Image (cartoon, rainbow, N blue to C red):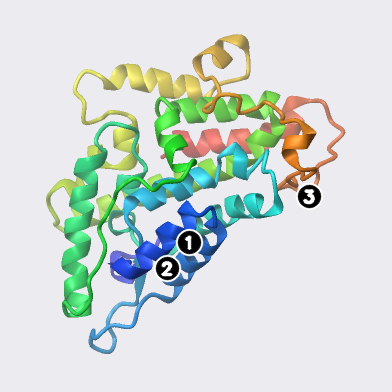
């Protein structure tokens, strides 16, 4: 894990650029938006900071990370994409997300604010905006307007967010593992998405522990305020025990009737195969090379991936 001093400084997208990105998304040009965002996170921005200062990455507000994390797993951009461009948007979205923990801290990135279920979204976003704005004013010398408009993006996928459709994180975990049994094509994408989420949660914990050990104080070092802590409701007295039980059931879901009832599809008709006319004859390719695995044995086909996910979740 990069040390805190090695993480890049996070700067917000300028108002003008964010307007362009928003238009790309709203005009159903997600690949153009993602290409621009990827350039900003990799190349950063030239600033008036002294030589030798930390490199920077330019990131959008949390609502955009919410949308991108949904594009990466939504059936319309993965399993049942209607066109090559739609499918490419899902791939590009996941690729963009995977860059974030490699370049910037979870705390500064806005991921902790974006990756929330319905409760607690607005307060977390306000904290992120205030902290990022202060850093931007120093790095930019107050010379450029920056955008903090975290309003809902007018895009169908934004209104169908994974963070609003799933009951909680354990709903996603349980359903994903159920997919490993019954819906192989959905499991392929859920597995990649969950690998990213587990990495982010792990980095979040490591960053908080490092800050605490260095003598930092406040909400940024409290483990119960971490992404995993919130998913386990560690900050909700009296709720934790039931959530731990639900988490265990999700991690050990097995596709049987009880697990399917407790962890149903995240999206309505998520596994319904569209008619060929609706698919425009486009079939999203498998993310694996070996798509013709002849084995009918569940453990042989999905065991290693499921076991690895379970171990990584248990050992967080």
Q: Which numbered circle lies on residue 41?
A: 2
User: Quadrant location of residue 213?
Assistant: bottom left
Residue 12 to residue 246: above or below:
below
Residue 5 placement (x, y as % from top left) = 28, 70
Residue 169 seen in this snapshot = no
How dense is the environment of label 1, judged by Cα within 10 Å: few (below 14), some, or many (20 and up)?
A: few
Residue 143 to residue 265: above or below:
below
How dense is the environment of label 3, judged by Cα within 10 Å: few (below 14), some, or many (20 and up)?
A: few
Residue 30 placement (x, y as % from top left) = 53, 56
Residue 149 placement (x, y as % from top left) = 26, 55
Q: Quick one: which residue is furthest to the bottom in this view?
A: 51
Q: Secondary structure at mark 1?
A: helix
Residue at x-position 26% and y-position 63%: 147
> Which callout, 1 or 2, points at the residue further toward the start of the chain?
2
Residue closest to the eye, 88 or 11: 88
Residue at x-position 49% and y-position 41%: 157
Instruction: Tell me the mark number nearer the camera, choosing from 2 and 3.
Output: 2
Task: Report which residue position mark 1 lands on.
Answer: 99
The reply to whether discs 1 and 2 touch (Cβ–Cβ < 8 Å) is yes
Quote the CA–CA distance across marks 3 and 1: 23 Å
> Which callout, 2 or 3, points at the residue further toward the start of the chain?
2
């Amino acid at each position: 894990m990069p040390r805190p001093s090695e993480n890049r400084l996070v700067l917000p997208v300028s108002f003008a650029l964010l307007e362009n990105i928003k238009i790309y998304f709203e005009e159903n040009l997600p690949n153009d938006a993602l290409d621009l965002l990827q350039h900003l996170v990799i190349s950063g921005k030239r600033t008036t900071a002294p030589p030798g200062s930390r490199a920077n990455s330019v990131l959008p507000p949390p609502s955009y990370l919410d949308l991108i994390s949904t594009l990466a797993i939504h059936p319309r951009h993965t399993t049942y994409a209607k066109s090559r461009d739609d499918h490419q948007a899902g791939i590009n979205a996941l690729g963009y997300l995977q860059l974030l923990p490699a370049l910037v801290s979870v705390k500064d990135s806005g991921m902790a604010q974006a990756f929330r279920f319905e409760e607690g979204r607005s307060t977390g976003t306000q904290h992120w905006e205030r902290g990022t704005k202060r850093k931007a004013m120093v790095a930019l010398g107050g010379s450029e307007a920056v955008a903090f408009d975290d309003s809902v993006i007018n895009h169908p996928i934004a209104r169908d967010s994974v963070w609003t459709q799933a009951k909680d994180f354990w709903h996603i975990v349980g359903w994903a593992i159920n997919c490993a049994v019954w819906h192989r094509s959905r499991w392929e994408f859920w597995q990649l998405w969950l690998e990213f989420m587990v990495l982010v949660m792990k980095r979040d914990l490591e960053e908080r522990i490092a800050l605490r050990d260095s003598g930092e104080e406040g909400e940024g070092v409290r483990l119960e305020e971490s992404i995993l802590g919130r998913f386990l409701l560690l900050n909700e007295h009296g709720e934790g025990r039931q959530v731990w039980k639900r988490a265990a059931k999700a991690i050990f879901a097995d596709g049987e009737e009880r697990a399917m009832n407790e962890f149903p599809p995240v999206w309505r008709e998520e596994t319904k195969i569209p008619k060929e006319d609706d698919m425009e004859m486009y079939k999203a390719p498998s993310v694996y090379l070996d798509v013709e695995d002849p084995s009918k044995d569940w453990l042989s086909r999905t065991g290693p991936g499921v076991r690895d996910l379970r171990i990584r979740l248990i050992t967080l």
